[in-house]
Amino acid sequence: MPDIWGIGAILSKLMLYVGVSGATGLLITRAVFADLVSPLADMMRSRIALMAGLALVGSVLSFMLRGAALTGGIDGMTDPEMLGLLWQTPVGDVLIYRAVGTTLMIAAVFIPFVGQWIALAGGMIALWSFCQIGHVPDLEFTGARLLLLLHLLGGAFWIGILVPLRALSQRPEYLSSAAMLGHRFGRLASVIVPALILAGLLMAWMLLGDVRALVATGYGQTLLIKLAFVGVVLSLAAANKLRFVPAMLSGDTKAAHHLVRSIEIEALILLVIFAATATLTSVLTLPN
Amino acid sequence: MKKLTTFALIAMLASQAFAHSNVDTTKPENGATVSEVPSEINFNFADDIRLTKVSMIHQEADSVTLDLGDHTSFGREFTLPIQSMGKGSYRIEWRGLGADGHAMRGEFTFTVD
């Protein structure tokens, strides 16, 4: 078991992942499907700011908890020597990326016209921060960071679609918009999701290097748990695309109700996938 | 679904490979029995690390935090003086920062008999 600081590191990373992917995903969705999600403009703006705020808090907390992990006591969270030490490592660099990215998202999302593009740039900076440190960026392969960015972008887009799709599906007057949003995203997803999975599997292979490490190590076992839940979420997404969305396109309001429920379960599973990822990146050591 | 989710979270946290502890060798060796209390302990790490806290816990005495002295930079080998607490088992717990920013921790034990 990790100590209390290890568990704190996982939870703060979870906040960071949910916040960055949620905010950036909503920004991508707003840019790609502006015509369909316009009735939700106000709700999406405040949700983006909220998610970016969560990511900012998660980033700062994650940094301070590393200080506590260095001393083994809560005093480490504010110990200038420990925080100063961390500041000089890549951990300090990514804190800057994340603070700049999330602040840009919070400030720019309320600025009309050009604001959404500035906020999107903020989201990209925050996503890029994950490509600066960790197991994947440490790999001696130049494409590893790009693979990770592709993986993160695809994941963020997928997560970002869930909020507006659920909100539109809950309102019968927007049934056709919800159906069209699901349909158009479904078409994009048939390219994005395989790319997302392929990038994830390639990174896993580069990190583990051996199939036996999947079952023989804590890192591999946690990765297997993550993959199992990815399988479940893919089944739900397939049901949405092949069953509920086509039914909604033909005016079936019950299908919209099922889609809402399916999205809620999907969100819960995505949370477990994030928790597995946070465990992999925070406290587990790579099998050598 | 809730049960499955809870099981997955517990399974992840129950994993044994935590903490990025990559200490290579120690003196005394982990689990060793020695006849006299050594005047110093030694760590050898596989990668560069900056030690941030080292505690010594004796089975019948309080825990003491060891003075890191001049060890205020990254390195692979560290030697720290210790004070005798008599016979019995000693546990050395260490924490440190990897050059990549990872917080690390670990421990080793030895017995004076």
Image (cartoon, grey):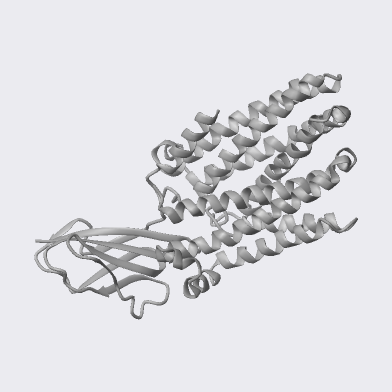
Q: Where is residue A19 in the image (x, y as percent from the top left)?
A: 66, 50
Give A192 or A181, whichever is nearer the viewer: A181
Q: How many labels does the image show?
A: 0
Seen as rendered, the residue at the extreme bottom is B70
Residue A74 percent across, percent down from the top left: 45, 63
Question: Is residue B95 positioned above or below A219 on the image?
Answer: below
Q: Nearer the viewer, residue A255 or A101?
A: A255
Q: Residue A16 location in percent, x, y?
A: 61, 53
Is A31 placed left or right of A242 in the picture?
Answer: right
In the shown orientation, is residue A178 left or right of residue A83?
right
Q: Up-down: is A197 above or below A283?
A: above
Residue visible at 64% across and 47% down in the picture: A18
Q: Which residue is drawn at 60% across and 42% down?
A: A200
Where residue B109 sits, quadrant-wise, is: bottom left
Asked if one can make out residue A210 in the rendered structure from this viewpoint, the answer is no
Q: In which quarter of the image is residue A226?
A: top right
User: Would residue B112 be found to the left or right of residue B5 on screen?
Assistant: left
Q: Where is residue B62 in the image (x, y as percent from the top left)?
A: 23, 65
User: Where A47 sits versus A249, above or below?
Assistant: below
Q: Is residue A276 visible?
A: yes
